């Protein structure tokens, strides 16, 4: 059994084509080539925190993977990271523990950002005029970083509740070449951006439609529990294409879960991202379409990134 540290993981990540690895995981999931049980979840109240346990395997792999990841939003006040966790890789043949990946939650953060980039690759308009980011935390940074290889657009509008955090975001992302404008009024995001990523832990809608939407894509990654919601369900009602990373998960949590309860979308009209990647379902078919991807985080993402790290370390 090998213990792999955060520094070892960070050293090999640049060598890995994470887009290709995670795309393959989504395809395997949508084609029924994986076993992914329901999410294990532990919610804490004082201080508020959440722990997700995601696990499963892809048929024919050497390993099955169990991931434990936590999020404690109040840690920022203590000068601590808001996320943490680890991944465990076991032999599919014997059940022996092969490796412990002490990634401190970084692999979960990265695989989430990579999934956002994949959604944009298949669903965003061909010409991105302005990127909208909801939130100013680590995921808001990683999502924007992973879009750099997909679009030349560097014009970004970022929404947040606290100007101090928005100022830090502007400084950090400006160093990467982005032209960042900030706002505490979310309405400007829908009005001026045609690629939008939401990354907050909101429990009520912060992005609301004030009229007809046209020619944009939204990737929602913040709502990964049944109680969270970033988008007004009317936004999903106006979408021409609603995409789930996992239909089974999204009917129980996230934006699709809320829209189904409000009867803003119908389950038969939802397709999975893996189906689009594989060519088994159509993605964006015109520039005028409104598309939306609800990414609640699927265990195949954890499996694929853990496998890739193990393969790179050798």
Image: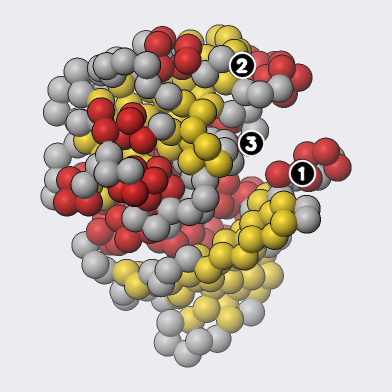
Residue highlighted by disc 3? 138
**Residue 210 higher or lower than 314, as above or below:** above
Which image quadrant for residue 52?
Answer: bottom right
Q: Look at discs 3 and 2 and give the one toward the viewer.
A: 2
Q: Secondary structure at mark 3?
A: helix
User: Marks 2 and 1, how far apart in space?
Assistant: 20 Å
Image x and y of residue 80, in percent: 81, 45
**Dot 3 crowding, Cα within 10 Å, few <14, some 14–19, many 20+:** some
Q: Quadrant of the N terminus?
A: bottom right
> Which badge, 3 or 2, is on the more N-terminal residue?
3
Residue highlighted by disc 2? 184
Image x and y of residue 230, in percent: 48, 35
Image x and y of residue 277, in percent: 24, 45
- The answer to whether the residue labelled 2 contacts the one labelled 1, judged by CB atoms less than 8 Å apart, is no
Q: Secondary structure at mark 1?
A: helix
> Which badge, 2 or 1, is on the more N-terminal residue?
1
Q: Residue at x 37, y 16 (%)?
A: 210
Confirm whether residue 177 shows in the render: no
Q: Secondary structure at mark 2?
A: loop
Image x and y of residue 270, in percent: 22, 47
Q: Is residue 230 left or right of residue 101?
A: left
Q: Is residue 290 left or right of residue 224?
A: left
Query: In the rendering, which numbered label is found on residue 186?
Result: none
Residue highlighted by disc 1? 74
């Amino acid at each position: 059994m090998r213990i792999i540290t955060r520094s070892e993981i960070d050293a090999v990540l640049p060598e890995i084509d994470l887009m290709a690895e995670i795309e393959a995981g989504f395809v395997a999931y949508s084609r029924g080539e994986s076993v992914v049980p329901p999410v294990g979840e532990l919610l804490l109240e004082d201080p508020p925190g959440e722990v997700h346990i995601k696990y499963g395997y892809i048929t024919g792999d050497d390993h099955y993977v169990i991931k434990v990841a936590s999020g404690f939003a109040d840690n920022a006040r203590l000068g601590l990271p808001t996320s943490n966790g680890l991944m465990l890789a076991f032999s599919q043949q014997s059940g022996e523990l092969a490796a412990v990946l002490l990634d401190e939650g970084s692999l979960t953060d990265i695989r989430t950002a990579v999934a956002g980039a994949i959604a944009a690759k298949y669903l965003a308009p061909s010409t991105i005029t302005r990127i909208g980011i909801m939130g100013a935390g680590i995921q808001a940074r990683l999502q924007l970083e992973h879009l750099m290889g997909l679009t030349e657009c560097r014009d970004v509008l970022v929404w947040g509740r606290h100007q101090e955090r928005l100022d830090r975001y502007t400084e950090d992302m400006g160093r990467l070449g982005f032209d960042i404008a900030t706002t505490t009024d979310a309405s400007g995001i829908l009005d001026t951006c045609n690629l939008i990523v939401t990354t907050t832990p909101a429990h009520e809608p912060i992005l609301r439609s004030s009229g007809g939407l046209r020619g944009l894509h939204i990737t929602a990654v913040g709502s990964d529990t049944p109680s969270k919601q970033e988008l007004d369900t009317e936004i999903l009602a106006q979408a021409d294409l609603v995409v789930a990373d996992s239909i089974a998960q999204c009917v129980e949590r996230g934006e699709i879960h809320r829209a189904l309860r409000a009867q803003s979308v119908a389950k038969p009209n939802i397709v999975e991202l893996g189906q689009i990647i594989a060519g088994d379902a159509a993605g964006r078919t015109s520039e005028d379409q409104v598309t939306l991807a609800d990414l609640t985080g699927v265990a195949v993402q954890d499996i694929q990134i853990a496998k890739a790290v193990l393969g790179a370390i050798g």
